Amino acid sequence: MPNELIFFICIVVYLGSVLLLYKLFGKNGLYAFAVFGTLLGNVSVCKCIDLFGLSTTAGNVIYASTFLITDILSEKYGKKAARNAVLYSFSTMILWLIGSQFVILLTPNKSDYVNESLNVVFGLAPRITFASLVGFICSQSIDVFLYHLIWKKTGNSKKMLWLRNNGSTLTSQAVDTVLFTTLAFLNTYPTDVFISILLTTYLFKAIVAIFDTPFVYLARKILPLDELPDKKIVKTEN
């Protein structure tokens, strides 16, 4: 299956999963996906792939999907709820960094066959996670700030939801891309590959940001199961 097809399938699956978890579990479902997205993003970003003839990383879609989380939380529950998602994910990444290093320190037994592979992936964890921490906390904070700034300027208008969503996300992801790519990959790849990763990472994140706009509109209409009014059971006498 070509990478390009997998890319678009991932967009639908990840963004659709956000709405499904939101419907089933409300805010907790969004928080769960935010944590999942940051963890998988930290691992998959280590893999370099080609999309449409351009070099980029495999973690673009899943990581970009986490921005949909903060936008939905901002739209439905306000700034505090969106900031909580950022803090939960940030804390998880710190634990991931600590835990992955403990895994490397453990001495494998003679029958082990995955230690070398884990050392390669987890060995990148300090630099990757540090870069991700810096990019994540800065970009997500900017995303939440800009979302509510645009909201104050335009009002709680459904017609202007696309502007709140795209304006905040496209700007914050530009900040994230520059910070993360520079801290994680500078001097790791040849200069031409590094520049290609920098530009294409933002390009593909921007594509996900544009695709997630209809999902924000759908999320605005969704009433999670845990927020449904209790149904009173009326007993009838025979």
Image: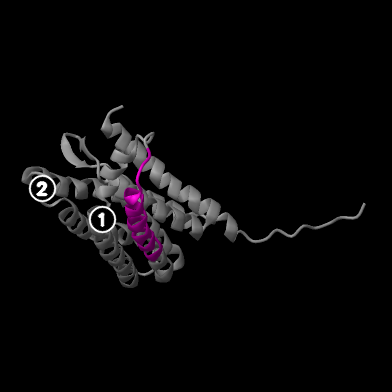
Q: Which residues are magenta?
A: 87-109
User: For the view shown, which residue lies furthest in the bottom direction?
Assistant: 152
Q: Is residue 6 left or right of residue 177?
A: right
Location of residue 157 by image quarter: bottom left
Q: Is residue 1 magenta?
A: no
Residue 88 position, x and y percent, is 41, 63
Labels in figure, total: 2
The quadrant in which residue 11 appears is top left
Above-or-below relation of 212 to 91: above
Q: Amino acid at mark 1?
A: Pro
Residue 159 visible somewhere in the drawing: no
| Type of colouring | one colour
Image position of 22 (left or right of 170): right
Residue 166 percent coordinates (x, y): 29, 57
Give the farthest residue toward the right. Answer: 238
Q: Is residue 199 above or below residue 144?
A: above
Please state if 47 lies on the left or on the right of 216 as rendered: left
- Which residue is tagged 2? 195
Mark pair 1, 2: CA separation: 22 Å
Depth check, front residue: 133 or 165: 133
On residue 126, the disc is 1
Asked if one can make out residue 87 in the rendered structure from this viewpoint, the answer is: yes
Q: Disc 1, disc 2: CB below 8 Å?
A: no
